[in-house]
Image: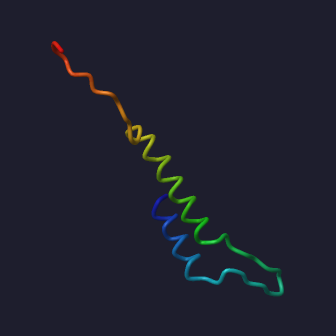
Amino acid sequence: MPDQLDEAIRQNAIGPKSASGDAGSMEQHLLPHQLAVDRYLESKKAMKRGRGFRVTKVVPSGAV
């Protein structure tokens, strides 16, 4: 899926923002929005793999 998503973003960046013809018209999402969705999906995938970034408090053992 990442290869397909990368290819879709690349194709959308190369192509026109909007186009119209006899059959109708179409408009793509803005590239910053596409990149934000890609970043969101990648972070979601990272959370599934290893729980992402985790902050814990380290308590040293021994007498104080």
Q: Residue furthest bottom?
A: 22
Q: Quadrant of residue 14?
A: bottom right
Q: Quadrant of the C terminus?
A: top left
Q: Is residue 23 left or right of residue 33?
A: right
Residue 1 lies, in percent from the top left, at 49, 58
Q: Residue at x 16, y 12 (%)?
A: 63
Scheme of colours in the image: rainbow
Q: Residue at x 82, y 80 (%)?
A: 24
The vertical placement of 47 against 34, above or below, is above
Residue 26 vs residue 37, the one in the foreground: 37
Residue 42 lies, in percent from the top left, at 47, 53
Q: Residue furthest front?
A: 64
Q: Quadrant of residue 30?
A: bottom right
Please count the marks in the image. Answer: 0
Residue 35 vs residue 10, the one in the foreground: 35
Residue 2 vs residue 40, the one in the foreground: 40
Residue 60 lies, in percent from the top left, at 21, 22
Q: Residue at x 19, y 17 (%)?
A: 61
Q: Residue furthest left?
A: 62
Residue 40 lies, in percent from the top left, at 53, 53
Residue 19 vs residue 53, the one in the foreground: 53
Q: Residue at x 79, y 87 (%)?
A: 21
